Image: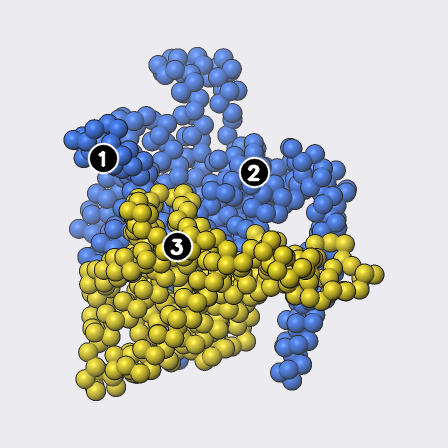
Chain colours: A yellow, B blue
Amino acid sequence: MDLLNALIVFSNFVFIPALAYGSQLALGALGVTLIYGILRFSNFAHGDTMAFGAMITVLATWWLQSLGVSLGPFPTAILALPFGIIICSLFILATDRFVYRFYRNQKAKPVILVIVSMGIMFIMNGLVRFIIGPNDQRFADGERFIISVREFKQLTGLREGLAFKTTQGITIITAILVVLILFWFLNKTRTGKSMRAYSDNEDLALLSGINPEKVVTVTWLIVAALATVAGTLYGLDKSFKPFVYFQLLLPIFASAIVGGLGNPIGAIAGGFIVAFSEVTITYAWKKVLKYSLPESLEPTTLMQLLSTDYKFAVSFVILIVVLLFRPTGLFRGKAF
Amino acid sequence: MENLKTTLLFAVVVFLILITGFVQSWNTALLILNMGLISAIMSLGVNLQWGFAGLFNVGIMGFVALGGLAAVLVSAPPVYESWSVGGIRIITAIIFGIFVIITIGLWVKKIENRRKKFWGAILIALAGFFIYRAIFDTGVVAVEAVNPASTGYLGGLGFPILMAWPIGGLLAAGAAWVIGKTALGLRSDYLAIATLGIAEIIIAIIKNEDWLARGVKNVIGLPRPAPYEIDLQQSDKFVSTANSIGIDPVTASTLYVKLIYAGLFSIVLIMIFILAQRALHSPWGRMMRAIRDNEVAAEAMGKNVTGRHLQIFILGSAICGIAGAMMTTLDSQLTPGTYQPLRYTFLIWVMVIVGGSGNNLGAVLGGFIIWFLWVQVEPIGQFLMVILTSGLADDSALKLHLMDSVAHMRLLTMGLLLLVVLRFSPRGLIPEK
């Protein structure tokens, strides 16, 4: 029995990766949930919006790197983020002007908007593949680790090491900052309050003189920023591959629905619930159990509940359980 | 007037395929025709769900893949050794798993106390899962060790592959029943997301469960309903007939096989089309459209909305399953790695919307036209790109990049097409009457 080493192994392979992945999912789910709250449809193009924003950031990163700009130990991508956010916002606003606004004025049924978002998804997916190609792109630079396995072992003298990647640290810190700013905006500023009012009751909001077009524009801007940040963080942490972002759609929707569609706090909680379930269920627990159980009970198998190929199944099962037992989500969705 | 337009549109399809035959090759033309027929069937299935009932299914890929799986399970030769070493254990484990799920269902239904209900269900699920894995895993290891280079799976039933078509439909219908039971009756977006999820899971299972259909190692050389080209080329009768018409026997044999497939697919398409058409004009079809147009009113008239939705969801998915089995038959192999949602789910949606949702002829037309575009946008794009970049030097980085990216033009084209049709002709090329 060696509980300390068990804890280190657990943090290294489960806790920290899940925390970083959960932050990325939470940011993605926030975007989905905001669109649902204000524009009242499920945006299938969200995954590809993330890919698009991340792609612009990758291109800007390469450009900055070619100029010799760097942030020392931090990835250059952070400097490139504003470019990604601005161009992604412009693109998204253009889709709103030329595509979504028409249906909004027509008061089209939500499901029509979902189909329209499918068209946008095709276009963005095509654009991303057209511009950067379908392959893996690496753009992370700077210091790889805040603390590496070797340093940790030397520092503590323990048998197991703990690696904390810079990208994981940046992901978590950025996510916290973004969420704080978002909630400050929604709760304290006039525009944020009008967004909440619009989401709660459209008719009353219109009656009290809130300009719906402004609310929609601001929502799209926030969503574009959130998607770009989420996409870039995911790309930094893993690697940038256009197709992966489409597959993120399922865990992101699962997070948003588990928390309650339209509820930002729910989206964050949902992101972490999905991430932690995914990682704990697909992790092979052998090593942790070896340290935490007496020797006689040492496991002989990998102690892995599901192979990582089935990680989608985890978000799916969570989704189904919530739909069956509490269709409005854990935090009672459809209200800020 | 209406009929004239419809006739003209179908004439355009025939014309496009003939042009391909004259300009490119008749093999390409028949290839497009065959996949067009399959696409039309998928499109009919989705039209049943969306056009008749307004159900939003984005898991078409999963149902198509299940049909493909059925083709393998029905037609591949059985591997007796696998059955004797571990097959029984795997089947036992799966039956046990179903039993556990039923137990959980009964528990949730019977127990009143919320806390007891929740934790009891979790406990049964966990215990069941570990016992299941204990039986299942040993079976899988044994089966996959049987001659892994060529088999390593349970094999199929060794039946004629044509039998797989209805069975593929049944398999898809079963999956649709499970998913419909859970997600229908909730909000429409939930069905969309649930189907999106189930499709990904079905693909993951087919990719990773090697004992089932060899996963990404693919089962190749499934039996065919048509003769093999090589046999035809060696048959004196065929060669002399081909020579007497004046076609090279090798080309003739490939065309002959493709024509047989085209005939088989046409029969299925016509059968499904007639059934769908009869359904649309029956009292049942009217009830479906009444439900689609106003659920509340239909419910007030005593119609069981969720029940009807479940019915039509299963029917539509079954049609997609049949089409999937036909596609695997055409390819003679199941390649789970090639199943991608953009191609097998969202493209079918473009077919239905562009063709005209709610109109069976429209769905068929959309199937052909969109499939034709999907195949031909690439050569056309290549051609345009050569003209566009003709001013650039041959080794310029931009030109090389653009030429490389032509393959991705089709996604852009499809997206634009979908948006344009939705905006300017939302009822499609052949609108619902």
Kindly identify which chain the residue marked by label 1 belongs to. Answer: B
Kindly identify which chain the residue marked by label 3 belongs to. Answer: A
Q: Is residue B224 visible?
A: yes
The residue that mark 2 highlights is B218
Q: Is residue A304 above or below residue B158?
A: below
Measured as percent of width and height from the top left, residue B96 is found at 72, 60
Q: Residues within 10 Å of mark 2 (few under 14, many from 20)?
A: some
In this rendering, which labeled residue sits more in front, label 1 or label 2?
1
Left or right of B190? Residue A110 is: left
For the point 21% across and 43% down, the residue is B8
Local SS, label 2: loop
Measured as percent of width and height from the top left, residue B36 is found at 36, 40
Measured as percent of width and height from the top left, residue B6 is found at 24, 47
- Amino acid carrying mark 2 in the image: Asn
Q: CA distance from mark 3 to mark 1?
A: 42 Å
Discs 3, 1 touching: Cβ within 8 Å: no
Kindly identify which chain the residue marked by label 2 belongs to. Answer: B
Q: Earlier in the sequence, mark 1 or mark 2?
A: 2
The residue that mark 3 highlights is A72
- Amino acid carrying mark 1 in the image: Met
In the depicted view, which residue is nearer to us: A237 or B58? A237
